[in-house]
Every structure is written in C-alpha cells, then in structure tokens.
Amino acid sequence: MQAEQEDRFQEFVRARWSRLVRTAYLLTGDVHHAEDLTQTALAKAYRSWRRISRSDNPEAYVRRMLVSCNSDRFRKRRVAEALTAAPPERAGRDEGAGRVEERGSLLAGLAQLPPRQRAVVVLRYWEDLSEAEVAEVLGCSPGTVKSQASKGLAKLRTHPGLAADRAVSGRRGQEQAQVRVQGRVRIQGQVQGGGR
C-alpha cells in the first residue's frame, strides 16, 4: 500500500473506530468480541483499501464487512453464549443504575435474536439506517429487511426483561421513557409500539 493510501486508511480508522466498535458490540453483546470483530473487519478492509476508498461510502462497505465477519464467527463457532438473567444485587437503586439494567435487558434480548435479525435491528434502529441502506449492507432486498425487522421486534417484545422495563417505564411516564441512551430509545420504542 502506498504511503498516501496508508494515511487515508489510518484517518478512516481513527475517525470511525468507536462507531464501528459500538456497532460490533451490539452485534456480539461482548466488548472483547466487538473489538476483535472490528479489527478483523478492518484487517480485511486494509487489504482492499484502494478499492474501498474509491467507493461512494467506505464506511458502509466496512460496516457490511463487519456484519459478514460476525456471521462467519457464528458459522465457525457454534457455542451458545450464556448471559446472566439478573445482575448481582445492589445496595441502592438510582436512575443511572436503572438505565444500566434496562440496557442490559436490551442487550440480553438482542442476544436471543438470530444473527441476521439482530443485524437488521441494530442497523435499522440503532444505527438509524434506512431499509434500503440496511439491505445494501446485508446484501438482501428491502422486503427481507422489513420482514426480519418485524420478526426481530416481535421477539424482543416477548423478552421478559424488556416486558418488565415496559411496565416500569409506564409507571414513570412517557417523558422519562423518552430519555434514554442514544439508539436504545428507537429500539425500545419499536418494541413497545409495534414497529414502523
């Protein structure tokens, strides 16, 4: 790789690293797996950077590689990951702890989805991509994105931790339910409201 291409790749990585890791975290449910997945996708992108950098949207291309590498990870390793149903007891409960528990419930719900549905839900409602953009990233039709999103959201609605969150947020009022971590609002809203 020429020095100029190398510099552009390094700029791309510095600018997009945290966003790619966040997406990978939502796909994997584990910080360490997310970093490994991001590094794997970026290593593949590095080998083809000259071609990728000429595309209209290099980030979308690398995001597609991220989803593909995650799918490969499931094909190669068919070991189920065990997540704890409830965190250890805490001395007190504050609003920050409540948000952490809600986020944990959401991540546990996402972990129960098949990889394709999980990718669709994460890209559509967390990354806020359009159905056409998600279809492009996943290499499928917009109709497939719609059906996978619908099925994924239906499964999330039945997840016990998210059902408990809905009951709690109903008591706190709609205003407080709106104030959530970025992205969580959209997914939780879709789970509660029946999708788009």
Image (tube, helix red, strand yellow):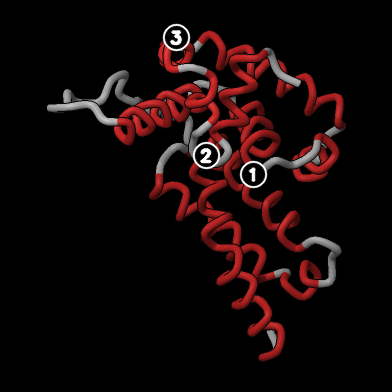
Q: In the figure, residue 17 lies in which quadrant?
A: bottom right
Q: In the image shown, does 112 or 169 lie closer to the viewer?
A: 169
Q: In the figure, residue 108 lies in which quadrant?
A: top left
* Category of crowding for the residue at label 3, using alpha-carbon neighbours closer than 10 angstroms: few (below 14), some (14–19), many (at least 20): few
Give the residue type that dot 1 points to: Val
Q: Secondary structure at mark 2?
A: helix
Select label 3 or label 1 by which is in front.
3
Quarter of the image with the C terminus in it: top right
Cα gap from disc 2 to disc 1, whole angstroms: 11 Å
Count numbered badges in the picture: 3
Q: Residue at x 48, y 26 (%)?
A: 176
Which residue in the structure is indicated by mark 1? 67
Q: Residue at x 62, y 38 (%)?
A: 126
Does 190 appear above or below 35? above
Which residue in the structure is indicated by mark 3? 167
Give the residue type that dot 3 points to: Ala
Most extreme residue toward the left is 91
Nearer-N-terminus badge (3/2): 2
Q: Secondary structure at mark 3?
A: helix
Nearer-N-terminus badge (2/1): 2
Q: In the image shown, does 98 or 41 lie closer to the viewer?
A: 98
Percent position (x, y) of residue 183?
Answer: 58, 38
Does 195 appear above or below 64? above
Q: Residue at x 74, y 54 (%)?
A: 60
Give the residue type that dot 2 points to: Leu
Q: Residue at x 65, y 30 (%)?
A: 121
Which residue in the structure is indicated by mark 2? 26
Q: Is residue 184 left or right of residue 11?
A: left
Percent position (x, y) of residue 113?
Answer: 56, 22
* Category of crowding for the residue at label 1, using alpha-carbon neighbours closer than 10 angstroms: few (below 14), some (14–19), many (at least 20): many
Cα gap from disc 3 to disc 2, whole angstroms: 24 Å
Q: Is residue 167 left or right of residue 178?
A: left
